[in-house]
Amino acid sequence: MNLELGEEITLNNKDKYIVMGVTTYADKRYVFLMNNDNDLVIKIGEEVIENDKVFVKIVKNKKLIKEIIEQVAGEKISD
Amino acid sequence: MDYYEILGVSKDASFDEIKEAYFALRKDLSGPELDLLEMAYRTLANDSKRADYDMGINSHNKTVKIDDGDGFREKLYHTIDLDNPHQEILLRFDDKPNPSIEEEIHSINTYNTLEKEAEDLVDEEELEDDLDFYLTPREISRALALLVRGDGDEYIEGTNVAKPRDRRADETDEEYTAFLEKYYQEHFYIPGTNILKPRDRKANETDEEYNNYLANYYAIIFANKQIQEDDYEEDYDEEEELLEVTDRNRHAKLKKVVRGLLIAGALLLGVLGIKACTANDKESKAPYGSNTTVDEAIDDAGNTMEEDYSDYDDYAEELEHSIVNPEIDDLPELEEVEEDYSINVGDKFNLDESTLLYTASTDQEAKGRVNTNAAALGEYTIDKIVVLDSNNNIVANSSFGEVDLDSYDDSYKKMIHFSRNVTVEDIETGRVERNNEKNLGWVFLENLNANQKIGSVLESGKTK
């Protein structure tokens, strides 16, 4: 059910993306999406599952983006 | 002239003989000659280094074609194995096939001078322009320093980065801090960027786990980069919309991710090049402080996720000047791997994506350009297969006959030496575009069985 790394997905029958990364933050699952036509548009989306359907809520909150990025980039520093 | 000749001992000399020869010779030597003698001694006096050295001695000098601006010329490279047997580093010496000791010393001196000049150069880009695809003088002296320094507590904990030197007596605090900043920048960041290198693979991590980590890491870095590039609104209060996933294709999988990362990486480097050029003109703060990746990203960050890409055309046009082959379609199509594939000397293959990531992710990566090149897709030829036991003793070497990988279990390390003989359009940030032929070194295939794939086979050479 969950989105997986490397999957190609279509949102609202319109925009195609590839799942470039998956991470969990504050008990929510986030995916890093890149436009399938490789125009370098990358978005971070929250995975939402409702009634056996998968939705993606694009994260637009700057603070949250910061925290998610810090989480993964921070892993490098602590290591 | 090899290390045995420098010490004046035979190839099967014992440790005592080597030691004796070293102490007898060192009394009469000084300066670079002494350095070379010490290098020879430190290599041969250490069993595992000696084994590595013996293994590499046949391919000690390599001729590589290099485009030096006026066309292709053959350059001689001198190879030195670093303390890790899976590392090989190419040093460029003079053009003669068998340099004498004087010539080698001359080469070292030349590079020492170059290094000094390099430090004086205000415009570092100019330097890179001249020396790209060779190791820079600084990289060479770092490699030499590593060789001379030997092993022990010489590395920054948890990394394969050598500790920086101590403060010199004649150095002020400021100078030393500046040195340290530069040192860490060079070792911990992807060259020419303010992007931290991903961590090394953990000992208990599987290939898949590490590849996932890398994919995540780069995805985040690129997302981060995208945030910096885009205009944004400071306060974004709009309600977030739920978008339904209407179609899924799980088979796209990593192949596309890796391609995406490569393209994204290429574009990113292009962008960074442009940014670096313009940044030099401003008195901006140093781009490479610690935590820069996150903090700067966030400071500049914003709502990148807006659908307004009005500047995108300009941005793309700008990129076209600096990036070769930005189209994904130009990448070579990988072919399916035959199931019964086994490895033989003379085989030609394309690195597949998992190998690609694996290769780039071993601790080879931190040690320089040679290994960075390993991350490029391309056609390779297997030159040699070597099997080492757990003590790094060579137990099989295809130079001396056939190697049957099946007869060695996982306790053995299997290495292939491969060369790449393909012309690629290389990416030069900024302005230069040129063709280069590259030569790659060892790939360490610890988990490789005889029948495992290493990539898409293009052509099988010898049969078993």
Image (spheres, coloured by chain):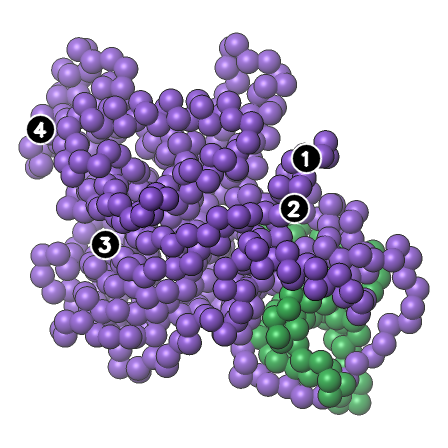
Q: Is residue B52 above or below residue A6?
A: above
Q: Secondary structure at mark 2?
A: helix
Of callouts 3 and 2, the N-terminal one: 2
Chain of the residue under the numbered disc 2 shown in the image = B
Look at 79% across and 81% down and name the residue there.
B243
Horizontal side of B246 relative to B460 (left or right) equals: right
The colour assigned to chain B within the rendered structure? purple
The disc placed on residue B9 is: 4
Residue carrying label 1: B281
Residue carrying label 3: B388
Q: Amino acid at mark 2?
A: Lys
Horizontal side of B16 relative to B39 (left or right) equals: left
Q: Amino acid at mark 3?
A: Leu
Of callouts 2 and 4, the N-terminal one: 4
The colour assigned to chain A within the rendered structure? green
Quadrant (top left, top right, bottom left, bottom right) of the C terminus of chain B? bottom left
Q: Amino acid at mark 1?
A: Asp
Badge 2 and badge 4 both on one subunit? yes
Residue B152 location (% of width, % of height):
38, 33
Cα–Cα gap, marks 1 and 2? 10 Å
Chain of the residue under the numbered disc 1 shown in the image = B
